[in-house]
């Protein structure tokens, strides 16, 4: 960690910050993970040997990459430096999305087919618990203090709040159709849940466990059914929420304080999941139908570049170059 | 039902915030009317005993999973009837106080059931595709989850136009429902600018459809039947009665693709469908039913999910509240079609994309890009508000 911090610090100090990052992109149809260099924005490596990779995340030290290999029914694990495959983790059937707890020891994995959330210890590679949830669990989010993991179920249309100590559901919140993703604000006070079919983002007040407001989207020239909120990310300072709008080919920028949409950024086709660079200066988007990744400068909210990756990019994670 | 997962107790104890826990039991029925016709052309198309019911059971299980969080339970009665027994079976359901009934019957029977139910029940048609049911014969207590003939024809027509295959050779069967389906294709051709360059009728002369070495005669008959047609891009078959269309591919005089009732088929479902999360539905279905899903299974699932969604959104509302919600503009449903599905208020038809399936794959999904509409691109498929003959 110490060397990492120093690396990050030096890169921030540089006049033109060189982004010594690596972006790992799952290609759902290509059965690969594309690795981009954050500096050159070129594909430097393609990891093969997995079936239907979707959700992807990294250990908090950035050294290990976890991939939901949906059709392999396991979580594949890779060394972020060498791209070598490490021993896999059990995931339960058809893992789609997962979240790593703030400590970095446990993965909470949504199993679409079995109405379960599977909890796996990444060190011992043991399944710690299986939590029954609603129909078609998908989105996974974790509170900043790590006490609550949120799962969204796509056909039940709820966000299920799971206690990470007891593995019991402690709350359920009904949201709009096909909830896809759950994301807390850094202060842990607010939880956003995107609803793909409903076309909204529910703003859930964590204290009362109730929907306080729904954010809606409107792009001139697009019919409402094209506006399908999917992946979301909140900036580290909690000021802005970015929402991928799927077939609308746009990322919405939401001012968290006022909950108003301030901008729509045109990206690639069927934009799915989003990931920040470690320093937060860039947001990367996985664009499923145009087989590319768009890069957004978060200071100006301009799309600065797009890079071709593999077939049907689904998710991504960015780590400092080891 | 036994194949599907039951729920752990832990979830039952969790509180649902928002609507109060209601402890409501919802009772529904699926009534399927089987008539004794000849067997299908292909033995692969033999009807499974649990056709439709397996989809209904999955929907009931899905509704129950959600209900465990909301204090709602769901119960569905599956009824097999014949044209002779259906009225008595319906009377039993109505006497039993069941207010939500899914029908799988032909058009005439469906209308009769709707009239029999009157204001006692809301009916959802999950089988009859006839446009008349959404037009002159529409009923205020009857909704349709299965796409109409007009929607299916438009879905295929949009794709054929996108392919620039605009010269059609239309072959229709001799039954009235075949003629109605052919009329839907003619309407689509006019709507989207295709030309029907030749039209023929395949007479149903009765007899068994499958016989040992029957292919020898078919191989001789179909080329002769289809020969000497003007130049065309595609053959469109309107064979509602399922008498001949399966014989057309590879037997036509001219080397042209077949679409409609065989070849490239407009449908609401196929077990090959994987888009928009459909794989997880297929997996769930196959685990419970131990077979692949058919269109009727999906439609029964959609029909009962309409009830489940209304139960959730009304916070455990009674029959009147559920019915009002379903008929209101607030109702919307996710059903693996990439966008929310809603009911048309002018004829009770569920708006939905239509799949174009051939052999083992989904070839395309309509509406096609570029076919625009002022309110919803889904309304480029089927009978629009300004065209409807429904006066319910």
Image (cartoon, rainbow, N blue to C red):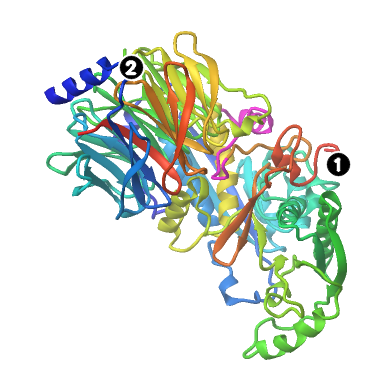
- Secondary structure under tag 2 reads loop
Residue A179: image x %, image y %?
Answer: 46, 32
Q: Quadrant of residue A237?
A: top left
Mark 2 belongs to chain: A
The residue that label 2 is drawn on is: A236
Mark 1 crowdedness (10 Å alpha carbons): few <14, some 14-19, many ≥20 = few
Q: Position of residue B70 (x, y in %)?
A: 44, 29
Q: CA distance from mark 1 to mark 2?
A: 54 Å
- Which residue was labeled with disc 1? B387
Compare residues B122 and B273 and report the one nearer the observer: B273
User: Is residue B85 on the magenta stretch?
Assistant: no
Q: Which structural element holds mark 1?
A: loop
Of A131 and B359, which appears nearest the observer?
B359
Task: Indicate the quadrant containing the C terminus of chain A: top left, top right, bottom left or bottom right.
Answer: top left
Q: Is residue B7 visible?
A: no
The magenta stretch is B315-338
Q: Main secondary structure of the magenta part?
A: loop
Residue B325 shown in magenta: yes
Q: Position of residue B261 (x, y in %)?
A: 71, 66
């Amino acid at each position: 960690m110490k060397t990492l911090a120093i690396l990050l610090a030096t890169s921030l100090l540089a006049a033109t910050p060189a982004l010594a990052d690596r972006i790992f992109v799952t290609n759902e149809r290509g059965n690969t993970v594309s690795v981009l260099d954050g500096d050159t924005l070129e594909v430097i490596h393609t990891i093969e040997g997995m079936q239907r990779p979707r959700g992807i995340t990294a250990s908090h030290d950035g050294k290990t990459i976890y991939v939901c290999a949906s059709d392999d029914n396991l979580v594949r694990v890779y060394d972020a430096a060498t791209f070598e495959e490490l021993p896999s983790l059990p995931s339960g059937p058809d893992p789609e999305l997962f979240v790593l707890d703030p400590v970095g020891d446990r993965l909470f994995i949504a199993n679409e087919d079995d109405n379960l959330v599977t909890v796996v210890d990444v060190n011992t590679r043991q399944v710690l618990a299986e939590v029954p949830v609603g129909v078609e669990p998908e989105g996974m989010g974790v509170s900043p203090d790590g006490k609550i993991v949120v799962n969204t179920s796509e056909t039940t249309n709820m966000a299920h709040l799971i206690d990470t100590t007891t593995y019991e559901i402690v709350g359920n919140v009904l949201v709009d159709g096909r909830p896809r993703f759950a994301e807390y604000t850094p202060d842990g006070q607010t939880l956003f849940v995107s609803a793909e079919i409903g076309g909204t983002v529910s703003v859930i007040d964590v204290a009362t466990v109730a929907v306080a407001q729904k954010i809606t989207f409107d792009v001139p020239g697009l019919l409402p059914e094209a506006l399908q909120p999917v992946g979301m990310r909140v900036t580290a300072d909690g000021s802005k929420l970015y929402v991928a709008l799927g077939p609308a080919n746009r990322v919405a920028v939401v001012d968290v304080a006022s909950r108003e949409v301030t901008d729509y950024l045109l990206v690639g086709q069927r934009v799915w999941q989003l990931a920040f660079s470690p320093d937060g200066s860039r947001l990367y988007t996985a664009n499923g139908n145009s087989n590319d990744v768009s890069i957004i400068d978060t200071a100006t909210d301009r799309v600065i570049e797009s890079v071709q990756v593999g077939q049907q990019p689904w998710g991504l994670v960015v780590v400092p170059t080891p | 039902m036994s194949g599907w997962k039951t729920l752990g107790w832990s979830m039952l104890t969790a509180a649902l915030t928002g609507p109060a826990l209601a402890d409501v039991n919802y009772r529904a029925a699926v009534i399927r009317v089987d008539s004794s016709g000849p067997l299908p052309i292909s033995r692969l198309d033999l009807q499974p005993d649990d056709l439709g019911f397996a989809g209904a059971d999955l929907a009931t299980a899905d509704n129950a999973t959600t209900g465990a969080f909301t204090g709602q339970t769901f119960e569905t009665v599956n009824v097999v009837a014949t044209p002779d027994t259906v009225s008595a079976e319906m009377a039993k359901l109505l006497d039993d106080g069941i207010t939500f009934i899914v029908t799988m019957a032909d058009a005439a029977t469906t209308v009769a059931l709707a009239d029999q139910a009157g204001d006692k029940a809301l009916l959802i048609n999950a089988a009859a595709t006839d446009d008349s049911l959404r037009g002159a014969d529409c009923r205020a207590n009857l909704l349709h989850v299965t796409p109409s003939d007009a929607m299916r024809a438009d879905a295929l027509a949009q794709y054929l136009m996108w392919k620039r295959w605009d010269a059609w050779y239309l072959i229709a069967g001799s039954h009235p429902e075949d003629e109605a389906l052919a009329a839907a294709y003619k309407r689509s051709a006019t709507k989207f600018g295709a030309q029907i360059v030749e039209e023929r009728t395949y007479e149903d002369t009765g007899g068994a459809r499958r016989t040992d070495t029957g292919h020898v005669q078919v191989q001789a008959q179909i080329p002769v039947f289809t020969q000497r047609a003007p130049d065309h891009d595609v053959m469109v078959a309107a064979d509602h009665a399922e008498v001949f269309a399966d014989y057309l591919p590879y037997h036509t005089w001219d080397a042209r693709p077949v679409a409609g009732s065989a070849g490239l088929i407009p449908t609401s479902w196929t077990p090959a469908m994987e888009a928009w999360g459909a794989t997880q539905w297929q997996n769930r279905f196959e685990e419970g039913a131990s077979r692949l899903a058919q269109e009727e299974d999906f439609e029964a699932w959609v029909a009962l999910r309409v009830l489940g969604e209304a139960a959730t959104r009304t916070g455990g509302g009674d029959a009147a509240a559920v019915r009002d919600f379903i008929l209101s503009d607030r109702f919307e449903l996710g059903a693996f079609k990439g966008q929310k599905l809603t009911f048309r208020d002018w004829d009770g038809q569920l708006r939905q994309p239509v799949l174009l399936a051939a052999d083992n794959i989904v070839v395309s999904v309509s509406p096609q890009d570029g076919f625009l509409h002022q309110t919803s691109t889904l309304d480029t498929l089927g009978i629009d508000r300004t065209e409807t003959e429904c006066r319910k």
